Image (spheres, helix red, strand yellow):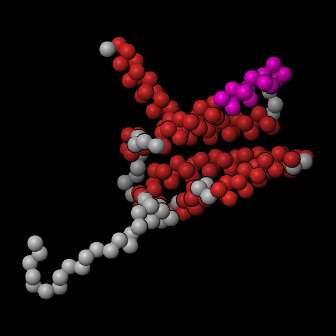
Amino acid sequence: MHLSAMEDGRSRALRLWGHVSADLLSAAVVAAVALGLYPPPAALQLTLPAALAVLVVACWLAMRRHDRGLCEHCAAAVPLDAAQRAARYGLRFRAAHAGGRPRVVVAYLAALALANFAPGIPGHVLWAAAQLSLVYALRAAVTHRRLQPWCPLCRGGGLDETVSTDPLPSDDRQLV
């Protein structure tokens, strides 16, 4: 019984970590930008980026695992006026859908990589802005996951709304 209680607590902790992993990933992107703009002391120049990389990979894996299941916290966080909110998030939905197209993803990653080579202070600003755009991409994915049934680009959660149905009789016949 003790082992099952430990296992239950461990799986609950993993589910919670998966639930907050998008926020942790956003914080990791901000931390990576901070490390790029303000390098750590010599004693931490290897350990801080390595720890950040481990955190990013672990959070990404937890987020992928979380996104494949039904989360009680996410279901409770769906707003009561979801359709009205979804109507206001058109740009986020377009960004989330663009993340599903390989050509867009490759171009975006190439732009992120090329921003590393921009010289001078404007280059640092461009690099920081490019890296911080990942936070918007993460938030767009989270918003889309939460409001997907109301996403106008998904057409009702990916279902085709043009399903043909048999017409009802227009005379006085009784339906059986």
Query: Quick check: can you spot residue 124?
Result: yes
Instruction: Let me know if residue 129 appears in the view.
Output: no
Image quarter hosting the N terminus: top left
| Part of the protein shown in magenta | 41-54
Is residue 57 one of those drawn in magenta?
Answer: no
Percent x, y for residue 34? 75, 36
Q: Is residue 78 above or below residue 1?
A: below
**Secondary structure mainly formed by the magenta segment:** helix
Looking at the picture, tell me which residue is in the foreground, 146 or 154.
154
Percent x, y for residue 129? 75, 49
Q: Residue furthest bottom?
A: 171
Q: In the rendered view, does 54 fall on the left or right side of 12?
A: right
At horizontal 9% and vertical 84% (from top left) the residue drawn is 172
Q: In this view, does 21 lie to the left or right of 79?
A: right
Residue at 38 percent of width and 23 percent of height: 8
**Residue at the spot x=42%, y=42% of the render?**
69
Residue 25 percent coordinates (x, y): 61, 38
Location of residue 174 with respect to 86 vertically, above or below: below
Q: Quadrant of the C terminus?
A: bottom left
Q: Quick check: is 42 in the magenta stretch?
A: yes
The image shows a total of numbered marks equal to: 0
Residue most extreme to the top: 2
Picture coordinates of residue 10 (x, y %)?
44, 23
- In the displayed structure, would residue 48 be above or below residue 60? above
Q: Which of 62 and 175 is in front in this view?
A: 175
Residue at 64%, 34% (x, y): give it: 56
Vertical order, 60 against 111 (above or below): above
